[in-house]
Structure formats: C-alpha cells, structure tokens
Image (cartoon, rainbow, N blue to C red):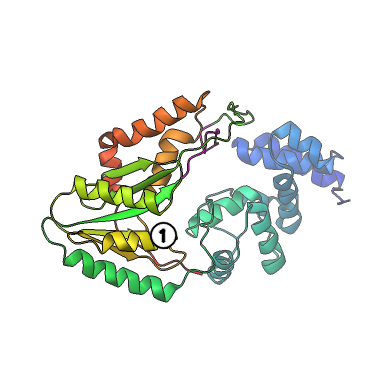
C-alpha cells in the first residue's frame, strides 16, 4: 500500500494554498493531495472529486517529486509535456509498431521507459499531439501478396486508360446478408446502454452482383445458391443492361467464377465480357466490397426487422433506390487502391 503520509506543516501549507487558488482544476489537485495526506484513500478522494484514481495518485507523485510548483504546473492536455522531443519520438515509434488498446497501457510504458508519470487523460492528449487517434485496427489477410497486388494495380491503370467510350468496368462479388440484428457504432449517453431487439432466424439472402465503375450503379440478382449457373445468369443480365461496348469484370477467385461453365459462356461467339481476376486474398482491391459495407451500414447495422420479408424488402429497396445515395457513393467508390501491408 502506498504511503501518502504528509507532515502537519505540509498539510497546513496545502490547505492555505487551496484557499487562495482561484482556478478550480488546480484547487482540485491541491485538495486531492491534502486529502490523501490526511488519511483518505485514493478511492474516497476519487469519489469526492469525480476524478479517476490514477489521476489522483499521479497528482500525489507530482507533488512528491516537485512540490506545489510541479503539481500546479502539470496540465491535463495542454501545456508543455514532460517528455522531451527525443522521448516523444521514441514513444511515437513504439506506439506505431505496438498496438495499445488503452491510455493506461501507454502510460505504463512511459513510466517504465522514461520514469515519467502521466495520467490517462494526459496520455490521450499527448498521443493526439503526436498524430494518433483511437480507432479500430484494420484487419488484413495474412496471405495477401503485396507484389501481386502492386502488379494488379498497374494492370488496372492500363485497363482504365484504354477503355473505349462505350466500354465499362464492373466489380463482381457475392454477399450473404443474414436476417439477424447486428450492432454498429452509435452515439449513446455515457453510463447507459441502448438495447436492440434481436431475432433467432437463420434465414439469409444470397446476392450476386456487379458494380459499374462508370455509372456507380449496381446490378444484382438474388439466388437460392451462388454457383456457376447463377454467375452465368448475372453475366447475361449484364450484357442485356449494356447492349454495346466491351464489358470488363474485376472478380475474386471464387470457384464458380472460374468454373468450366463460366469459361464456356465467355467463349461463346459474340460474348463481349472479359473477366480480370484479382490476386488471391485481395478484397481491398474489389470495389464492390465497399458497396456491401455501405449497404450494411445503411440497412442492417442497428436496425431490427421482425420478419424476414421486411428484411428482404429493405435490402432490395436499398439497391433499387441506389440513386439517392449517389453523392455518398461518388466519394466512397473511387479507385484509391492501396496494397495490403503485412
């Protein structure tokens, strides 16, 4: 247990300083140290001042290290940090390479590496000054081939540059939205929960689709099963929707897209379709993946559908009325492809 014992003289000095201090945030620091020195526990002081216990303890450590001057000079987010420029660069390199979920964990590293105490709020401010934000890491497939992806991006640029006026490029993929409530992010009052109804249905839709790079519009089919025959039906719909010009399709390596039946269809006389296959494990290069994510944010996340029919209608309605989302899609569905970094 930490020793917060202070002398009678120190307590008297703190009490007088607290009486004279006009700034509440600084007065709270003096009060916290005074109360700890008077025999209060960190938990009781935390409850009384509505400040977390780590911050309370850190204030006391600052007082021990440099008295009132250091205690009152220390700022939660704003003034000169106690890490010098070199230490901050070391910290930046460490946090860039090592994922820390909490400010408390980063604070522990700072304490161990530099013998400097920072409360979690101070760590948060420091990290933001160094260019960090608190967000989810991006999950990438460990088997992605960066060289193959780089080569494909070069192929894509050449394909795009040589498109005829009536030609178009489509990104193709399947998705399988399930009739069950999925929670997404939302603004919720602190200390409260926002309850979403759920259902136990296991029904799902099987959607096979393409997305036009030129028009920003999808063409989809719902199927009982996504297989080679379903892929051919989609290709036939696409040729009917674009009656002239070459049709280039970017697709992943799903077996039904590479099947003998699909190859035979592409080889038929008059077929205007050419499929360009992505490198394995490259969803980051398939533009339609963004459309599926956009659809889920608009239709699925945080929304309860009590029947499968309502769920299906909402899903198909989204794609039918896709034009209302044109402005958002025009900024989302761009070919700013990046190679997956492993």
Residue under the point 29% across and 44% down: 219
In terms of depth relative to the viewer, which is nearer, 260 or 330? 260
Tell me residue 240's x, y (percent).
20, 46
**Looking at the image, which residue sits at the far bottom?**
147
The residue stretch that appears in magenta = 176-187
Viewed as shown, does residue 290 lie left or right of 133? left
Residue under the point 32% across and 48% down: 233
Secondary element under disc 1, as helix, strand or loop, is helix
Q: Which image quadrant for residue 218?
A: top left
Residue under the point 26% across and 49% down: 236
Tell me residue 167's x, y (percent).
16, 57
In terms of depth relative to the viewer, which is nearer, 62 or 310? 310
In this figure, what is the number of numbered marks? Answer: 1
Which residue is label 1 attached to? 284
Residue under the point 43% across and 59% down: 283
In terms of depth relative to the viewer, which is nearer, 174 or 94? 174
Tell me residue 207's x, y (percent).
41, 43
Q: Main secondary structure of the magenta part?
A: loop
Q: Which image quadrant for residue 118?
A: bottom right
Q: Measured along the vertical axis of the image, is residue 250 above or below residue 183?
A: below
Q: Measured along the vertical axis of the image, is residue 297 above or below residue 107?
A: above
**Looking at the image, which residue sits at the far top?**
306
Viewed as shown, does residue 334 lie left or right of 41? left
Viewed as shown, does residue 319 lie left or right of 40? left
Residue 35 can be seen in this image: yes
On whether residue 233 falls in the magenta region, the answer is no
Q: Measured along the vertical axis of the image, is residue 275 above or below residue 217?
A: below
């Amino acid at each position: 247990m930490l020793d917060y014992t202070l002398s009678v003289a120190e307590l008297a000095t703190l009490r007088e300083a607290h009486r004279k201090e006009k700034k509440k945030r600084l007065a709270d620091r003096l009060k916290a140290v005074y109360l700890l020195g008077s025999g209060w526990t960190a938990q009781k002081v935390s409850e009384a001042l509505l400040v977390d216990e780590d911050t309370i303890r850190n204030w006391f450590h600052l007082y021990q290290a440099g008295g009132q001057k250091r205690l009152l000079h220390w700022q939660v987010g704003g003034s000169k940090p106690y890490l010098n420029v070199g230490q901050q660069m070391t910290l930046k390199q460490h946090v860039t390479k090592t994922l820390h979920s909490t400010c408390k964990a980063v604070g522990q590293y700072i304490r161990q590496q530099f013998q400097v105490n920072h409360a979690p709020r101070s760590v948060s401010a420091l990290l933001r000054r160094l260019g960090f934000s608190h967000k989810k890491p991006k999950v990438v497939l460990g088997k992605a081939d960066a060289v193959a992806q780089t080569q494909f991006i070069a192929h894509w640029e050449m394909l795009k540059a040589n498109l005829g006026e009536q030609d178009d490029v489509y990104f193709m993929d399947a998705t399988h939205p399930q009739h069950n409530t999925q929670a997404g992010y939302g603004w919720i009052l602190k200390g409260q929960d926002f309850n979403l109804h759920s259902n136990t249905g296991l029904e799902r839709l099987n959607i096979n689709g393409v997305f036009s790079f030129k028009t920003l519009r999808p063409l989809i089919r719902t199927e009982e099963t996504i297989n080679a025959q379903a892929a051919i039906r989609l290709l036939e719909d696409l040729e009917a929707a674009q009656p002239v010009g070459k049709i280039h399709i970017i697709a992943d390596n799903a077996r039904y897209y590479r099947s003998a039946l699909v190859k035979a269809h592409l080889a038929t006389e008059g077929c205007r379709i050419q499929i360009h296959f992505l490198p394995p494990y490259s969803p980051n290069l398939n533009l339609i993946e963004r459309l599926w994510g956009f659809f889920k944010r608009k239709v699925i996340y945080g929304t309860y559908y009590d029947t499968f029919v309502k769920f299906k209608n909402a899903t198909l309605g989204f794609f039918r009325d896709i034009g209302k989302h044109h402005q958002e899609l025009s900024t989302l569905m761009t070919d700013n492809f990046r190679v997956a970094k492993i």
